[in-house]
Amino acid sequence: MIRTRFAPVPSGVFTINDLHNALFSYLIAKHEKGEFLLRIEDINQEKYSMKAEQNIYNILKLFGLQYDNKPVIQSERLNIYKQYIKFLIENDYAYYCFCDEKQLAKERLEATSKNETYMYDGRCRNLTKEEVNNKISNGDKYSIRQKVSKEGTTSFHDEVYGDITFENKYLEDQILLKSDETPTYNLSNVVDDGLMNITHVTRSNEYLSSTPKYVQLYDNFNFDTPKIIHFPMIVDANKKINNDSIISLLNQGYLPEALLNYIALLGWSPKSNKEIFSLEELVEEFDYKHITKDSCYFDIEKLNWYNKYYLKRMVDEEYLKYIIPFIIRNCNMEGKDRDYVNKIALLYKEHIKNAMELVELIKIFFDNDIVYHDECRKYLKNSEQVKKIVLTFKNEIIKINDWNVTSITQCLNNVSEICNTPTKDIYMPIRISITGITQGPDIIETINLIGKEKILNRLG
Ligand code: GLU
């Protein structure tokens, strides 16, 4: 049975790329009715954040990426890693390194300033057992490094990037256990993937160049090398890795379904041109043979398109349940009844790209003062005809006693007649004069919901 895992570090924010990794790993497993596991890579306690760990669980749940079994928590497995380190030392696959960290950092800096790639030169590789023991009993600090095989080449097959061969002389003796006795990712990922019986190692392509070292470790430990699947990364317009936070996007009012659907298509292409996928449909269709190699540009416009689609598709009740909390959190609700707020929210259902855009747009109903954009201010002043329409509108509004859609429609007809201007041409001056902006939903409903008092205030 196929088994994949998602292995996030609980520090900082949960990003678009994290979600991408989780989703692809989940889909690869579930497409073949396999297991999807979660491993919390929390060995580095300095970086650890409880909130970040909680976010991982919450986000996976929210997006429906249900993992099998209990999560594997690396900080609970330190003794296991130590045993594996011991095994490597005993079998000459790893060695004690007593080099001074500051000295190595200096050498690294020198190399980079000369534009050279730094690689540890292995000067502690050949210390004798006696030298090592003396230094240890002396209390000298040490780390433990992988003794990579420096001869020949290491090859592996990546399911996305194909057959890959590295020359071993370019592989660095990477640190497996730090001087503070904590294992590094380089060790723990291999040990855990082996012990968790991971059949397909799924991760972003930033790990491609480290993979030959991991392949050597699988061999050293006598683990079967799993299938290896690297994903392309999601980048910004300037080709930098995109670190947008999923929580921020959710807070911005992007729906999980929309995010999931969009992200699934970054780096994977379905057989057909279909663009709309539920999670179940993705499970059905996702085939890792169709993962693409190149980095994918995170296009917010495309995400907006998806979000708009999913918002429109919601039934009204569901939409209100989702959107009203955003309004309550961000608008002054004093004196507003629920029915009124629901009407406003529904007025925009077909128009908005996310919930926070709605919050911005509906300020015209909530705030007493509105901000007129410069061009709108000019528009209202620059033509006699516009001035006349606005003034007539004010005079007609004053006369309305029974405030409703019918009386407002009648009022607009009157304005059109008095100003001798077709109704469609009076909408823009009126919209601008009472909202300060050029676009919006149905004008009659807008007038109705802003209310007579606010409108008269705005018309001065
Ligand atoms: N903790 C690593 C990361 O978040 C895991 C990479 C992997 O899947 O092995 O990038």
Image (tube, grey):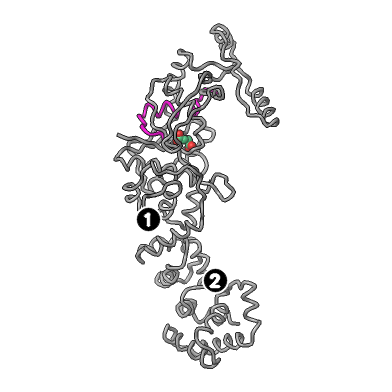
Q: Which residue is mark 2?
A: 367
Q: Looking at the picture, does residue 53 appear above or below residue 221?
A: below
Residue 233, image x and y in percent?
50, 43
Q: Residue at x 54, y 81 (%)?
A: 430
Residue 151, image x and y in percent?
52, 18
Q: Residue at x 43, y 70 (%)?
A: 341
457 sits to left or right of 161: right
Q: Is mark 2 within 8 Å of ligand 1?
A: no
Q: Residue at x 61, y 86 (%)?
A: 387
Q: Looking at the picture, does residue 338 appear above or below residue 432?
A: above
Instruction: Tell me the quarter of the picture where residue 141 sits.
Output: top right
Give the CA separation, mark 1 to mark 2.
43 Å
Q: Is residue 225 magenta?
A: no
Q: Which residue is mark 1?
A: 274
Tell me the quarter of the image containing the C terminus: bottom right
Q: Which mark is residue 216?
A: none
Label 2: how many Cα within 10 Å (few below 14, some 14–19, many 20+): few
The residue segment tinted magenta is 178-201
Residue 64, image x and y in percent?
36, 48
